[in-house]
Image (tube, helix red, strand yellow):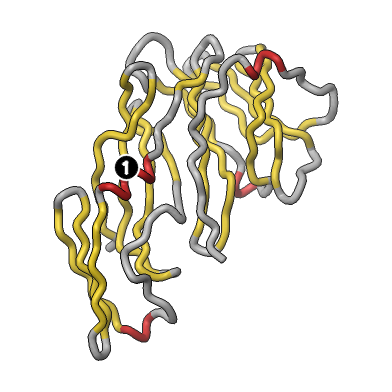
Amino acid sequence: MWFIPKLICAAIIALPGSLPVPNQERIVLAEIQENQQDITLSATTKPVQGMYSGITVIWNNQTKLFPWENISEPAYYPEVVTANIDGKGQDEVIIILTTGKGTGARGSSIHVLQEDWTEIHVGDPIAKAQNSLSSIYKEHQATVEYTMNIAGKEYVYSYPAEDAGMWFDEASIGRILRCRVSDNKLIAEIPVQVSPGTYTGTIEVEFRAYNGDLIPSEVSYIEDL
């Protein structure tokens, strides 16, 4: 069964301030000190079914508890970055959580906090990428072929049929979602798969600020070499 990751992007309004931080042993998941910002993420030391539930953010000696989740394996601990994502005022804190994993699958959750602890809503980059992708699958005697249109450009890929035990009926995205921050821009990375282990490249969706939200905007595609 495929694990289908979801991008959790709903803003959490006022809730953090209403949740007390338990007085118990906690494990540090991430910490940074940059741009005059001191930020630590922590959780209880007892994960449930491989997940930490309830993550505390300590930001310049202020503490809030959020009902977020992250995989408990150290390799999947959260990433914390400060950047001026919305292009206004002070830097925001961008927290990238890993919410699921599996064979050829990875889910991420993005949270962008402002200085007053309000959260900027982040739109769904997978939906944006899906609207920018179409494909046609053809079987030949010894090969399979995919003709894909991504963001208005055409790409053709051919593979020996024996290279995979199963080929998808169309190019697939959404099983893997990664995110990064580069030059004050939030970018989602969404690999394109044609079989469980075959990738043609990565669709990148760049966010931009609009009416107080971060919306998926520019779409580009980087082919695997």
x and y percentages locating residue 116 in the rendered image: 53, 9
Q: Residue at x 49, y 15 (%)?
A: 114
Q: Quadrant of residue 165?
A: bottom left
How many neighbours does mark 1 have within 10 angstroms: few (below 14), some (14-19), or many (20 or more)?
some
Q: Amino acid at mark 1?
A: Lys
Left-right relation of 204 to 39? left
- Quarter of the picture containing the N terminus is bottom right
> Taking 151 as reference, is 109 above or below it?
above
Left-right relation of 79 to 127? right
Left-right relation of 135 to 36? left
> Taking 114 as reference, is 28 above or below it?
below
x and y percentages locating residue 21 in the rendered image: 76, 20
Camera-nearest residue between 161 and 62: 161
x and y percentages locating residue 169 in the rendered image: 34, 71
Camera-nearest residue between 101 and 225: 101
Camera-nearest residue between 84 and 67: 67
Left-right relation of 180 to 144? right
Camera-nearest residue between 181 and 166: 166
Q: Residue at x 53, y 31 (%)?
A: 95
Q: Which residue is mark 1?
A: 128
- Count the labels in the image: 1
Element on which disc 1 rests = helix
> Taking 134 as reference, is 139 above or below it?
below
Q: Quadrant of residue 144?
A: bottom left
Seen from this angle, which residue lies furthest right?
A: 24
Seen from this angle, which residue lies furthest left?
A: 153
Q: Residue at x 83, y 30 (%)?
A: 25
x and y percentages locating residue 43 in the rendered image: 72, 33
Q: Residue at x 41, y 22 (%)?
A: 83
Q: Quadrant of residue 225?
A: bottom left
